[in-house]
Image (spheres, rainbow, N blue to C red):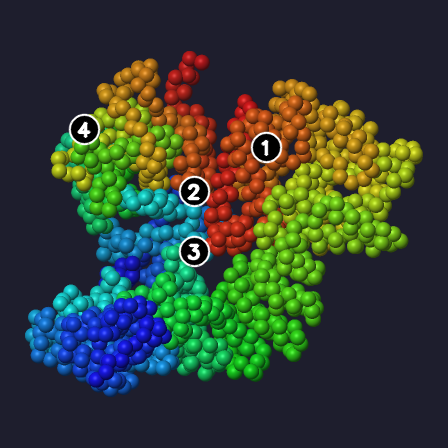
């Protein structure tokens, strides 16, 4: 820790950093920032930076306004898009109350608590997200729909296309920020992109996702386009998911790997998947937190609407991927419901908690889903015992409300806040008269 | 030459235990040796080892045995240290040490030269072996000297210093070897400065026979120097601690360096200083307190020590000093394996760590301003603190004696097997040997008894050293020989958590100055009470309340006696005063109640019969003076409420007992006051009906007393009866009014609420409820309980109530209506802007939810389930479970929520002496409330989380079963 602090202060001097941004995330998952002059950084390490938390969504109770932000020196990075003029750096923060206790409503703290609970059982939690997003001409809609920058299809190499420049530049910037990018390709929709972040522990990954979103938005502005992580911006095209690969390690050993298991998945791995499946419906209000999220979840294509798992089944909620022989360390499972607009701290905390619950209570893994679950009749699905994810935000909230798992993991106050905040969103949505209604009803009624 | 034989009896007298074996072994020894074994701590062991040694090296041993002095020394050593005996067996040539006359531990230079000479010309592993053998030979010499001293405790510091010097000499020799064997050019290696700084016990020159030697390596120059110096340091550490034929000496522990294990092994002086200036945490400074140039380049080492000194001594002014002191204290009482608690010499209460903690804390607090107390060794520091008036001389010398005692035991235990241990032996034989080796006792029981005495004294000395001198800052204590300035005393008070040290000092002055008996006793008592106050949630408030109390009680003999003689009562007093303003205020009014703290029995609620008897006696005594009678009755109420408050805080009574107790007290007061304004036969019958939580006998501190009044004309006409009843009601309100401890007689549950008549006749009630049989007023009857007044009218009222509250049948429409009303009042009654999740009475899943839930069940099933016919919420809930109306699991959630809300509400009143219905958000208040609810310190967030979770779960049950299809 001290070495890292030393490094930060030295770098600020050496690189003549003019501003240091302290980053943290509100409950909804929006990045917030407090700017410091370099001279204030040392004090911030020692005592934290006080600010009025009541201005931040869900961060504090209204009458307990003062909170402290404590920068985490291991997250220090110079922000590349600021160029050489007025170099600016950032660090992620932990939020505490004035008496030094972690602020209950700091999402980063929620994830840290969940990771600590896993560590108590000897586990570390690694994640690897594949983040999809759309590049649009602008944030304005034309004729009621957003306009993508191109119309290329999956894996097409578009000569001279914006997407290529865009990806090259983003990847470069992310790497400048110390974030390894594993692979990038063009997803199925026009203007849709996917960038995979490399495996890291869940806290680092969540920090990286927040950085990633900022980078992508910044690069888009630079190139005169607009990037969106909206779960389903175009009715006719696939939504933007954030499929996340997960694994648990016990020390240096991948706890999901068992050479003799089915798909080389260990008992712990199976129980983890069973936990994910059993608790998936109740955590969906967090992993898919917007009204729009449910347009993606139920939009067909390969969206994981049904609670199933499979090996090579592209419609399953949890996929157990194939990995190369001898690569036991890369044993993992992929959760496919979570979307690109989720708050990664809260979502990962819940996915971890759901999986651990499966391990703790020794849940049985149901049978593998074979065939396309989408094309089955409801009766078939019922016979096979395939449940479904909530069909709307409202539905998801009702399920979450009764979930001890979610309340326990988020803590009472975040739990209440998410429910209240999302109910408000649902009420606002419900109050709309949509073009769909006008089109289908106005002329005939 | 005649051989003298020794009888077994004589052997036993000499201290042998295994007499037969001793007899046989002695026969093989030179003549007349037996009596000398009496000098050994363990004669049997000495004899056995002597035999073994003789068979290995007969010549060397016999050379020793030719000299009486040498023989004595060898026998003492063999009897005390099997560990060193094995070394002598490996190296009999070292037996020569015994033949030289022993002097006091040699000067560091002499030892250093001896070790350097031993490694002269050697290299590689042979050099390591030579170094270690020479070290151990010196160790044998030192131990032999130590064992020869008539009073081991007196020389503990000289032995400890000798051991530290020896360790320094070993490091010097190791460094010399490293310079010779390094891969770097010899002249460059020679030119590279390397200082080895001793930390901890080696720095303080108070090393144990066997412990890790804490060091820090410092060089001077650039990267090249750091590189070479690092190689030298590593090589030197290997010479001491790497495996070789002659076993390693000890661990060289360099982990106190900047950044600990992850940091560079060697840094330049500048790099060290830069690091400390910027980053060091307080505990690192604490380690630096004892830094001393130990080996290598002493001049560079001295520069290092001079460089860090100002940083060390300003650490007490750092912001987190108080927290780090608390951290230190936690480390003192840190986790000790339970099976070791009773034999731990170092950790645990009354151990060496206690002594060191106390002294280091005092040094850090006062060393900032006064260089005189900046001493490295524990004993020197103690002396300096006493000489400069920070602690009493008597206590200081007592503390020094205890410290020497404990260290001597530690030395002897370690010497025995040459193992690093701090555990007293358990086995009787070993204890006896320890007693003899230390000279502190002669038997196993004797040494244990002495040790227990010392432990006890060490525990109390912390208080005497740290807290007592605080008094000297404000009161002249000529006999103690110390005088803190007020700034010094304030620094100490702030360090233990007083938020307003100046104010606290002022109170201490007021409590202790003067020549009165009270001041005298408080001077003795206050030090330990200050410590207890500092452990409470509000030390400042507690001290202030104590001062007021003491002012009130003045010279009262029993008070002083109690404080002086009953530490349990004094402790309880500090606990209630620093935890509850409510108690502070009441105690000020009724100071004599302090005496209850001595006995649990006094803190238990008085029985209702006793309370009523007292009320009746009071009324009879003041038959001619209504006002005086009312005062006496109100005073009795305050006194009994205080009793319950004390009992509740100290955990003597449960929340259920509290509810009943408070209700009984209210009843007793009302009974007495009603007797003042109404007599049977004065034309009407009059009764008071308890409602709400009073009716349920579930009152908490700060609850209103909900009541209704009923009368029946008995001799006068209806108008006159109403007029008389109203007069009684007004008089009741007037005579029960108490500004200090308000009793709010709340009539809000009467028919028509605030708009209704304040009192009605029985007939009027009957008519009203008949017409409005399903209103909140009728529902409120579920908790109606006639408590005070003429039995006939009360009985008639309860009969009437039974018909209404336990209807034989209730229609679905009526049930729906009850639910609807609840849904409406939920939003209406909650104060504007209040957070429903935190409102204890009307909030989500809190009191009113549980009560409505139970009341609906009572309305539905009361007629058929007799158990439901109770005014108590929890009893009715239990009855509902028994009748299978509610699953036990759901009932438990409701019960838990009801209890936590009730307890939190009472605790909030106790903490702040103000009644509020909202769980506080302020951290300090939450902390105070949490402590009253018996959470450990630092649980503000946990209490909040527990409350929110418990009530959320209750609300889930409520919504499902009350609003649902229930």
- Residue under pointer 2: A411
Q: Residue at x 27, y 24 (%)?
A: A367
Classify mark 1: residues with Cα within 10 Å, few (<14), some (14-19) or many (20+): many
Badge 4 marks a residue whose secondary structure is loop
Regarding residue B201, the answer to whether it shows in the image is no
Question: What label sits on residue B878 in the rendered view?
Answer: 1
* Between B411 and B876, the one nearer to me in the picture: B411
Classify mark 3: residues with Cα within 10 Å, few (<14), some (14-19) or many (20+): few
Badge 2 marks a residue whose secondary structure is loop
Which quarter of the figure has residue B276?
A: bottom left
Q: Residue furthest top?
A: A444
Going from N to C along the chain, the mark reached first, 2 or 4, is: 4
Q: Are marks 3 and 4 on the same chain?
A: yes
Residue A331 at x, y percent in the picture: 20, 37
Q: Are marks 2 and 3 on the same chain?
A: yes
Marks 1/2: CA–CA distance? 30 Å
Decide if residue B412 is on the left or right side of residue B850: left
Residue A68 at x, y percent in the picture: 41, 55
Marks 3/4: CA–CA distance? 52 Å
Query: Compared with residue B487, is residue B906 higher up or lower down, i.e. above or below?
Result: above
- Residue under pointer 4: A153
Marks 1/4: CA–CA distance? 67 Å
Point out the image quarter for the N terminus of chain A.
bottom left
Q: Residue at x 66, y 58 (%)?
A: B596
Marks 2/3: CA–CA distance? 18 Å
Observer-side mark, 2 or 4, equals 2
> Answer yes or no: do the residues labelled 2 and 4 have beta carbons within 8 Å?
no
Query: Compared with residue B773, is residue A126 higher up or lower down, i.e. above or below?
Result: below
Question: What label sits on residue A100 in the rendered view?
Answer: 3
Going from N to C along the chain, the mark reached first, 2 or 3, is: 3
């Amino acid at each position: 820790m001290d070495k890292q602090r030393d490094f930060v202060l030295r770098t600020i001097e050496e690189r003549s950093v003019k501003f240091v941004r302290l980053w943290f995330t509100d409950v909804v998952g929006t990045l917030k920032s407090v700017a410091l002059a370099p001279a204030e950084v040392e004090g911030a390490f020692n005592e934290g930076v006080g600010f009025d938390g009541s201005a931040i969504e869900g961060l504090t109770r209204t009458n307990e306004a003062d909170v402290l932000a404590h920068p985490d020196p291991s997250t220090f990075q110079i922000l590349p898009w600021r160029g050489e003029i007025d170099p600016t750096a950032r660090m992620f923060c932990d939020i505490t109350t004035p008496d030094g206790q972690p602020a209950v409503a700091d999402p980063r703290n929620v994830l840290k608590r969940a990771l600590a609970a896993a560590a108590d059982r000897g586990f570390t939690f690694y994640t690897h997200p594949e983040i999809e997003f759309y590049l649009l001409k602008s944030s304005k809609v034309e004729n009621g729909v957003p306009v993508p920058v191109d119309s290329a299809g999956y894996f097409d190499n578009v000569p001279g296309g914006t997407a290529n420049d865009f990806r090259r530049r983003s990847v470069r910037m992310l790497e400048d920020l110390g974030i390894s990018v594993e692979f990038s390709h063009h997803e199925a929709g026009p203007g849709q992109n996917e960038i995979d972040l490399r495996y890291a522990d869940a806290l680092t990954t969540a920090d990286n996702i927040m950085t990633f979103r900022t980078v992508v938005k910044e690069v888009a502005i630079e190139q005169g386009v607009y990037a969106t992580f909206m779960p389903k911006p175009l009715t006719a095209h696939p939504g933007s998911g954030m499929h996340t690969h997960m694994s648990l390690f016990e020390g240096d050993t991948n706890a999901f790997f068992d050479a003799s298991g089915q798909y080389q998945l260990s008992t712990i791995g199976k129980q983890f998947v069973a936990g994910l499946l059993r608790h998936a419906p109740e955590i969906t209000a967090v992993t898919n937190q917007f009204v729009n999220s449910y347009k993606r979840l139920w939009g067909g294509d390969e969206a994981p609407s049904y609670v199933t798992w499979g090996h090579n089944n592209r419609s399953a909620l949890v996929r157990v991927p194939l990995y190369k022989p001898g690569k036991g360390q890369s044993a993992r499972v992929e959760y496919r419901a979570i979307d690109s607009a989720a708050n990664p701290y809260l979502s990962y905390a819940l996915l971890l908690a759901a999986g651990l619950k499966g391990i703790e209570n020794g849940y049985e893994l149901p049978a593998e889903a074979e065939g396309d679950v989408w094309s089955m009749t409801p009766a078939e699905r019922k016979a096979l015992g395939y449940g479904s994810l909530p069909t709307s935000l409202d539905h998801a909230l009702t399920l979450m409300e009764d979930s001890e798992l979610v309340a326990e993991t988020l803590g009472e106050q975040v739990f209440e806040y998410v429910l209240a905040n999302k109910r408000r969103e649902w009420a606002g949505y419900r109050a709309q008269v949509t073009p769909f209604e006008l089109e289908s009803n106005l002329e005939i009624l | 030459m005649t051989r003298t034989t020794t009888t077994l009896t004589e052997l036993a007298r000499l201290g042998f235990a295994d007499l037969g074996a001793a007899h046989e072994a002695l026969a093989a020894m030179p003549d007349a040796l037996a009596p000398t074994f009496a000098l050994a701590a363990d004669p049997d062991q000495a004899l056995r080892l002597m035999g073994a040694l003789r068979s290995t090296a007969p010549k060397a041993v016999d050379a020793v045995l030719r000299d009486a002095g040498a023989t004595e020394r060898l026998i003492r050593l063999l009897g005390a240290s099997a560990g060193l005996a094995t070394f002598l067996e490996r190296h009999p040539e070292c037996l020569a040490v015994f033949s030289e006359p022993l002097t006091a531990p040699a000067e560091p230079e002499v030892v250093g030269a001896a070790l350097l000479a031993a490694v002269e010309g050697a290299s590689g592993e042979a050099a390591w072996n030579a170094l270690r053998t020479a070290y151990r030979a010196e160790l044998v010499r030192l131990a032999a000297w130590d064992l020869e001293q008539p009073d081991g405790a007196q020389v503990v510091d000289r032995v400890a210093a000798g051991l530290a010097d020896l360790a320094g000499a070993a490091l010097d020799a190791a460094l010399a070897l490293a310079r010779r064997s390094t891969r770097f050019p010899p002249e460059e290696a020679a030119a590279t400065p390397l200082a080895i700084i001793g930390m901890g016990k080696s720095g303080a020159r108070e090393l144990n026979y066997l412990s890790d030697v804490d060091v820090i390596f410092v060089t001077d120059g650039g990267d090249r120097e750091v590189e070479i110096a690092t190689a030298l340091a590593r090589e030197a550490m290997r010479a001491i601690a790497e495996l070789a034929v002659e076993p390693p000496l000890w661990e060289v522990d360099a982990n106190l360096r900047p950044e600990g294990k992850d940091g560079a092994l060697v840094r330049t002086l500048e790099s060290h200083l830069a690091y400390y200036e910027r980053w060091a945490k307080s505990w690192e400074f604490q380690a630096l307190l004892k830094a001393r140039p130990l080996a290598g380049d002493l001049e560079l080492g001295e520069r290092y020590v001079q460089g860090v000194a100002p940083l060390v001594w300003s650490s007490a002014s750092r912001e987190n000093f108080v927290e780090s002191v608390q951290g230190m204290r936690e480390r003192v009482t840190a986790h000790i394996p339970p099976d070791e608690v009773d034999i731990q010499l170092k950790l645990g209460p009354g151990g060496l760590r206690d002594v060191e903690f106390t002294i280091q804390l005092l040094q850090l607090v006062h060393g900032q301003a006064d260089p005189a107390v900046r001493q490295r060794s524990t004993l020197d520091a103690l002396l300096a603190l006493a000489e400069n008036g920070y602690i009493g001389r008597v206590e200081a010398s007592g503390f020094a004696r205890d410290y020497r005692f404990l260290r001597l035991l530690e030395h002897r235990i370690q010497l025995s097997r040459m193992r690093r241990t701090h555990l007293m032996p358990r086995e009787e034989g070993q204890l006896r040997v320890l007693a003899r080796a230390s000279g502190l006792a002669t038997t196993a029981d004797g040494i244990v008894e002495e040790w227990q005495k010392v432990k006890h004294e060490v525990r109390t000395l912390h208080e005497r050293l740290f807290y007592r001198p605080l008094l000297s800052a404000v009161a002249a204590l000529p006999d103690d020989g110390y005088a803190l300035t007020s700034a010094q005393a304030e620094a100490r008070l702030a360090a233990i958590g007083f938020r307003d040290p100046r104010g606290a000092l002022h109170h201490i002055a007021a409590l202790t100055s003067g020549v009165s008996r009270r001041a005298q006793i408080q001077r003795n008592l206050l030090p330990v009470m200050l410590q207890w106050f500092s452990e409470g949630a509000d030390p400042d408030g507690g001290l202030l309340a104590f001062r007021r109390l003491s002012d009130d009680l003045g010279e009262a003999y029993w008070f002083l006696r109690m404080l002086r003689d009953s530490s349990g009562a004094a402790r309880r007093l500090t606990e209630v005063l620093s935890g509850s303003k409510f108690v502070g205020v009441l105690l000020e009014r009724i100071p004599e109640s302090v005496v209850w703290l001595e006995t649990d029995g006094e803190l238990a609620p008085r029985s209702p019969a006793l309370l009523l008897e007292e009320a009746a006696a009071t009324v009879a005594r003041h038959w001619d003076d209504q006002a005086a009678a009312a005062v006496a009755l109100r005073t009795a109420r305050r006194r009994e409420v205080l009793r319950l408050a004390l009992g509740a805080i100290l955990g003597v009574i449960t929340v259920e007992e509290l509810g009943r107790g408070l209700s009984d007290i209210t009843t007793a007061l009302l009974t007495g006051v009603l007797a003042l304004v109404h007599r049977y036969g004065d034309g009407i019958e009059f009764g008071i009906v308890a409602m709400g939580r009073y009716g349920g006998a579930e009152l908490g501190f700060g609850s209103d007393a909900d009541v209704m009044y009923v009368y029946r004309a008995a001799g006068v006409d209806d108008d006159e009866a109403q007029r008389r009843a109203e007069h009684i009601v007004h008089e009741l309100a007037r005579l029960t009014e108490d500004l200090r401890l308000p009793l709010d007689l709340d009539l809000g549950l009467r028919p028509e609420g605030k708009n209704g008549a304040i009192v009605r006749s029985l007939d009027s009630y009957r008519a009203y409820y008949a017409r409005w049989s399903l209103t909140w007023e009728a529902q409120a009857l579920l908790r109606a309980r006639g408590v005070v007044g003429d039995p006939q009218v009360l009985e008639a009222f309860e009969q009437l109530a039974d018909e209404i509250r336990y209807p034989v049948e209730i229609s679905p429409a009526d049930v729906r209506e009850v639910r609807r009303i609840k849904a409406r009042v939920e939003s209406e009654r909650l104060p504007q802007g209040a957070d429903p999740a935190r409102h204890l009475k009307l909030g989500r899943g809190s009191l009113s939810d549980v009560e409505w839930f139970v009341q609906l069940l009572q309305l539905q099933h009361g007629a058929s389930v007799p158990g439901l016919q109770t005014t108590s919420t929890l009893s009715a809930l239990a009855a509902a479970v028994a009748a299978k109306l509610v699953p036990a699991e759901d009932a438990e959630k409701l019960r838990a929520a009801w209890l936590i809300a009730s307890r939190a509400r009472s605790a909030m009143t106790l903490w702040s002496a103000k009644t509020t219905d909202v769980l506080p958000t302020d951290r300090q208040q939450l902390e105070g409330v949490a402590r009253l609810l018996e959470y450990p310190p630092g649980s503000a967030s946990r209490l909040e989380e527990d409350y929110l979770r418990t009530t959320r779960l209750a609300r889930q049950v409520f919504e499902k079963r009350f609003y649902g299809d229930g």
